[in-house]
Image: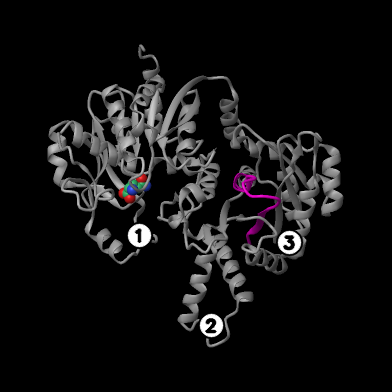
Amino acid sequence: MANYIFVAGGVMSSVGKGAATASIAKILESRGFKVTAVKIDPYINVDAGTMNPVEHGEVFVTDDGTECDQDIGNYERFLNQNIGNDNYMTTGKVYLSVIQKERNLEFEGRCVEVVPDIPNEVISRIKKVAKNTKSDFVLIEIGGTVGEYQNLLFLESARMMKLQNPRKTLFVLVTYLPTIKIIGEMKTKPTQTSARLLNEAGIQADFILGRASVPLDGPRKKKISIFCNLDPKDVISAADVDSIYEIPLNFEREGLGDRILKKFRIRSRKNDFSDWQNLVNTIKKEKSPIKIGIVGKYFESGEFSLTDSYISVIEAVKHACWACDREPVIEWLSAQKFETEKQNLEKLKEYDGIIVPGGFGIRGIEGKISVIKYCRENNIPYFGLCLGMQLATIEFARNVCGISLATSREFDEKTIEPVIDIMKEQKGLLKKKDYGATMRLGAWDCSIKPNTISSRAYQQEDISERHRHRYEFNNNYRELLEKKGLIIAGVNKEKDLVEIVEIKNHPFFVGVQFHPELKSRPLAPHPLFIEFIRASIKNKKRPA
Ligand code: GLN
């Protein structure tokens, strides 16, 4: 029977529960166990596909096409394993299935109630994950913060699971300890309050992970131990780190792996962290920098700059840089600025490579197209991801093939030059307003053309990559664009869809209809990102 570890957060959001959950999973994996992780989002949204990235961060997509929270990306990256639909739950998803069961008379006429029917559904879903993945440990991260109304039923599910299997269930509370500058002391009170709020839900934390700017000292650990009712050894210091990949090693230094196994009365099967240690050594050592500009629009929020919307892109760039022994320097470039202030384009020369990532809607489009044109004409390595591929195609059609009105049906429904168009099935879905989980999603096969940048990168002909988009390269323009020099470097043969475009005589100009960033892992960087970084390294030597 599997062991279950629930991870909840206290004090405030964004304290790094996802990275903590992934790190605990990693520790247990390094001890020789089969581990998986589940994310619970308390939203009514059935999945993350309908959420704006500025509000919720990146929409991560799994091989099976689940549009989920970015934490699933963290789990995949830490565990170097593919995670599926069952590992992602939202309030909406749980209620929807309970209501569907009720409609199907599966409750045999009895009154269906929030408690216990909702927690029972949650528990059966968690157990299904354990069974299907044959895991020794299932980590379950409960989104939100303790004390809020939204995640109460999930905490209730966790409490009920503990009651059913007391020796097989543990609770971890991740909190934040602020240090007020003028007082200069790290305060434990918000952590104490959070632990009590968890007690109110009938749960005693077995571990408290104290997030803070600096490590927790002895007196702080002791205080938390007394007031939160746990052994000081189970108060784990989780100070800020430069790279999240350091966290599992820091937790191990605090003895977390041994303490967890002790509580479950299980012995380690092995203890091998060498690959991970090597990775962290590479991350921390001094390396010469490589400067990558990402042109987007989902990072501006008032006066603040958020990078969560592009987290997988950032991680993929980092993984590839580390593999090439370079220090990633990533900068954000606002797409709209390239529309109003054309002189900004000159600044692109300061970058070793440019990425235009995925996106939706017309805002910032013309700025991105100007950037792509500049990269094409000035031999700056360019990597277009999904929307970035569609815009590279539009730019090529406009400026190389002379189709001045070329655009995507997404930006102009009545366009006469839909170089990027909507497919028939998609048109029907949009008419019905059937938006949820209906894009081209998840893993699709792609055949790579020999003697291309992509074939050099992948070193294989048949690949599979993850998608999330509605619009496609319009095959009516294929012949003309190819004649003018666009290389169709990858296609999905089954549906005859263009998946990769490249151009000749350029250090690196590649646009992919899929999202390679979603499959990059620190221990298995993505080949296209590596090829892009290699080209960027070469470009750095370019005379000014
Ligand atoms: N908006 C484009 C489409 O729906 C691209 C989507 C994306 O970049 N993920 O096809």
Q: Which mark is residue 438?
A: 1
User: Type of residue at label 3?
Assistant: Arg
Instruction: Determine which quarter of the picture holds residue 138.
Output: bottom right
Cα distance in 3D space between marks 3 and 2: 30 Å
Side of 391 relative to 104 (left or right): left
Q: Residue 93: horizontal and vertical position, in percent?
A: 50, 66
Indicate whether residue 149 is drawn in magenta. no
Side of 500 relative to 27 (left or right): left
Mark positioned earlier in the residue sequence (2 or 1): 2
Does the Cβ of the disc 3 residue fall within 8 Å of ligand 1? no
Indicate whether residue 9 is drawn in magenta. yes
User: Type of residue at label 1?
Assistant: Thr
Q: Are marks 3 and 2 in contact (CB under 8 Å)?
A: no
Q: Which residues are magenta?
A: 1-22
Q: Give the number of the mark in front: 3 or 2.
A: 2
Q: Which mark is residue 167?
A: 3
Identify whether 231 is placed above or below 367.
Answer: below
Q: Residue 367: horizontal and vertical position, in percent?
A: 33, 35
Side of 156 relative to 37 (left or right): right
Q: Quadrant of the N terminus?
A: bottom right
Cα distance in 3D space between marks 3 and 1: 42 Å
Mark positioned earlier in the residue sequence (3 or 1): 3
Q: Which mark is residue 107?
A: 2
Q: Are marks 2 and 1 in contact (CB under 8 Å)?
A: no
Q: Quick one: SS at disc 1?
A: loop
Q: Residue 266: horizontal and vertical position, in percent?
A: 71, 52
